[in-house]
């Protein structure tokens, strides 16, 4: 529990960096090199915003539950749009530290509620928790472009491989140019072809 709480503020900052269009790295998109696009808006995902806000709101909820006297203002509903990733991490680190110090792990109801809100929600696997956000947006192996293999549909060298998930899901393959994916009947053939060319 403490390890999860200790990393929560950094996870929120990481998500904020991916979301911020001024600072975000290209995320699961075709890389382009035309200079006119350098100042364009970086790609964002609404699910990243949902994950960040759900985790922030849960931290504030539990810090307040344990008597934290600080005012978190809008953080009880998520990270304010004007907050930088660093500012959000600073605010939420205080909430996480308060929870670690004040929580009573002997209180089974509190412990289960805290785990459900922040670690894993067994009755709702689509709910954003620290564990799910880490699995989704901080995998050990990042999505990568398959080197030297053209898309069978459009011919571009833009096949993206998303790695095996934490729960044993198969890797996925998608063309960043035309969004082609291998047909189910031929998945294994394409997997053996593409996995050999993954750029590490």
Image: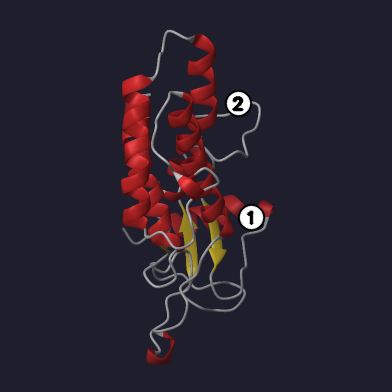
**Nearest to the observer: residue 114 or residue 131:** 114
Q: Element under label 2?
A: loop
**Category of crowding for the residue at label 2, using alpha-carbon neighbours closer than 10 angstroms: few (below 14), some (14–19), many (at least 20):** few
Q: Is residue 101 visible?
A: yes
Among the 4 quarters of the image, the one containing residue 94 = top left
Residue 132 location (% of width, % of height): 50, 39
**Nearest to the observer: residue 59 or residue 149:** 59
Residue picked out by circle 2: 122
Residue 163 location (% of width, % of height): 45, 49
Q: Is residue 197 visible?
A: no
Residue at the location (50% across, 33% down)?
A: 61
Residue 16 location (% of width, % of height): 41, 57
Among the 4 quarters of the image, the one containing residue 18 = bottom left
Residue picked out by circle 1: 186
**Nearest to the observer: residue 47 or residue 98:** 98
Residue 187 location (% of width, % of height): 60, 53
Q: Earlier in the sequence, mark 1 or mark 2?
A: 2
**Category of crowding for the residue at label 1, using alpha-carbon neighbours closer than 10 angstroms: few (below 14), some (14–19), many (at least 20):** few
């Amino acid at each position: 529990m403490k390890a999860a709480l200790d990393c929560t503020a950094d996870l929120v900052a990481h998500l904020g960096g991916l979301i911020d269009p001024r600072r975000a790295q290209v995320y699961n998109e075709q890389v382009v090199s035309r200079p006119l696009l350098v100042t364009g808006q970086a790609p964002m995902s609404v699910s990243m915003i949902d994950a960040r806000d759900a985790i922030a709101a849960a931290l504030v909820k539990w810090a307040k539950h344990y008597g934290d006297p600080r005012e978190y203002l809008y953080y009880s509903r998520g990270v304010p749009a004007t907050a930088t990733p660093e500012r959000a991490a600073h605010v939420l680190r205080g909430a996480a530290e308060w929870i670690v110090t004040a929580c009573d792990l002997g209180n089974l109801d509190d412990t289960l509620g805290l785990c459900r809100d922040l670690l894993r929600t067994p009755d709702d696997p689509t709910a954003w928790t620290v564990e799910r956000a880490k699995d989704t947006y901080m995998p050990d192996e990042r999505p990568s472009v398959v080197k030297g293999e053209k898309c069978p549909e459009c011919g571009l060298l833009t096949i993206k491989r998303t790695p095996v998930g934490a729960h044993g899901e198969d890797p996925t393959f998608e063309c960043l140019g035309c969004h082609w994916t291998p047909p189910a009947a031929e998945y294994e053939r394409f997997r053996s072809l593409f996995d050999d060319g993954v750029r590490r």
